[in-house]
Image (cartoon, helix red, strand yellow):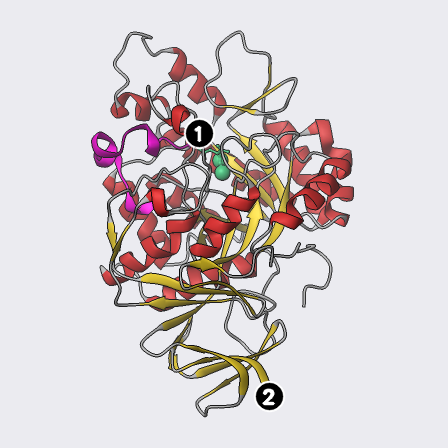
Amino acid sequence: MWDLGVEGGTLVTRMGLIRANLYVQGEKLGAISVERQRSHRSLDARERLVLPGVIDTHLHSRDPGLTYKEDFDHATRAAAFGGVTTVLEMPNCLPPVTDLGSFEARRAHLLPQAHVDFGLWALALGDANLAELPRLAAAGACGFKLFWGYALDRRTLALVYNPAPDDDVVPPPDDAGLLRLMDAVQATGRPLAIHAEHRGLNAALIAGVDPDAPDTYAEFLRTRPALTEAVAVETACRLAQATGVALHIVHLTAADSVDVIRAARARGVDVTAETCPQYITLSDEDFPRVGPLMKVYPPVRTVADQSALRRGLADGTIAYVASDHAPHATHEKQGSLWTAPAGTPVVETMLPLFLRLVSQGVFTLEDVARLLSYAPARRFGLYPRKGALEPGSDADLVIVNPDHPWTIRAAAAHSKHPLSPWEGETVPMAVETTVVRGQVVVADGELQTPGAGTFLRFGAPLS
Ligand code: NCD
Ligand code: ZN
Ligand code: ZN
């Protein structure tokens, strides 16, 4: 007798669609069978799609420290309602995760609030915390994150979004510092994730802006052009090639950078890249409608960039999609494009937006299983424990109604602030049920099992 059956649905795998029932024993998927079997509890998935739970490797919950923007309870609740069953949490909370003490404190602080499974990134400062990296890896950090392109506040190590010339900041490492960092990360065996924007170029372009100039999106894009991303990605790929580090470029935005990644991968460099829903569904043309809510770093660019990113995902140059869920308070995202902090809430709408791209013929359902679950799981060593509907894997799955159009309303969503760059847009399919390790976390529009998430200690045997 199985614990749970998911019956009558169409299973979406990266290899194709299968009409079959799923059976769960405890936390694991036990069987996929065309025949019905007996189970204590059953979920009716007739006329529904059953997808592997989404793995979001790029989430900023702000917790602890900046919880007026978002917190882990809200972020993982939003994740669960969006069909996301695993999140990898970014280290730029306050205090940031820079050493073993802050890592362990954060793990303990987040665990009781976790509605989905989670792993933790550690912050790479460059030389300032090189010696801590082995300890952070041993504690189970999923990887190291370098915010290359931001300055950090010298006192708090918070990201400085719009640095003024006289701010007291720690600049990001120079190329030689990055080489040392890559050697140190390579020795841990974990990936190095890089926010790739060339700070020197950005700073020079921003310094050239007339403070009285209108804050148009075109002017904003001129201060952070594709060039600054492509140069940073190229440098990172070359240094990764020299050191052998596993390099992951977060939130790729520019057609030029797709070309850089394609060439590096062809040379055999161990580099992967992600892009995000905002870059493949929005463009500069949306700014008059959406406003500063779509201000993110690096910026949303042109329709031509959007097309190149979509092609990069389709042909495997870009490995997968992550949310870069980075909420700010409502008042912070109003007003000037220059002064608003960068970042916007995404995690709850990521899968629905992707399903809309499927209905528009841009991607297939198999692509969704690959780009939102399997490929991120592969890159972080989570597969086969996670990332696919396979016997023996964790029972992480999402039931989607493929014939249920609904309108995105941030006020009805689950992040702390009711904001969405996709407010009022209609998507054709709805996430109905989310199961995390066999526990029904979301069903019937309610959070059924609060606190179901567990901490994923990377590096330990994960199955
Ligand atoms: C992120 C944030 O606010 O933490 N903002 C953003 O615009 N993407 C930081 C980041 O991912 O660069
Ligand atoms: Zn970033
Ligand atoms: Zn981010």
The tag on residue 329 is 1
- Element type at marker 2? loop
- The x, y position of residue 463, in whole percent, is 67, 68
Q: CA distance from mark 1 to mark 2?
A: 48 Å
Query: Which range of residues does the magenta coloring cover?
Result: 279-297
| Nearest to the observer: residue 322 or residue 400 | 400
| Nearest to the observer: residue 209 or residue 411 | 411
| Nearest to the observer: residue 174 or residue 343 | 343
| Nearest to the observer: residue 134 or residue 449 | 449
Q: Is residue 39 visible?
A: yes
Q: Is residue 2 above or below residue 108?
A: below
Q: Residue at x 65, y 32 (%)?
A: 96
- The x, y position of residue 448, in whole percent, is 51, 61
For residue 225, what is the image quadrant? top left
For residue 226, what is the image quadrant? top left
Q: Main secondary structure of the magenta part?
A: helix
Q: Is residue 296 magenta?
A: yes
Which residue does the numbered mark 2 point to in the structure image?
A: 1
Q: Amino acid at mark 1?
A: Ala
Q: Is residue 142 visible?
A: no
Q: Residue at x 41, y 33 (%)?
A: 298
Q: Is residue 21 magenta?
A: no
Relative placement, left or right, of 422 versus 129 is left
Asked whether the beta carbons under mark 1 and mark 2 sit within 8 Å of each other, the answer is: no
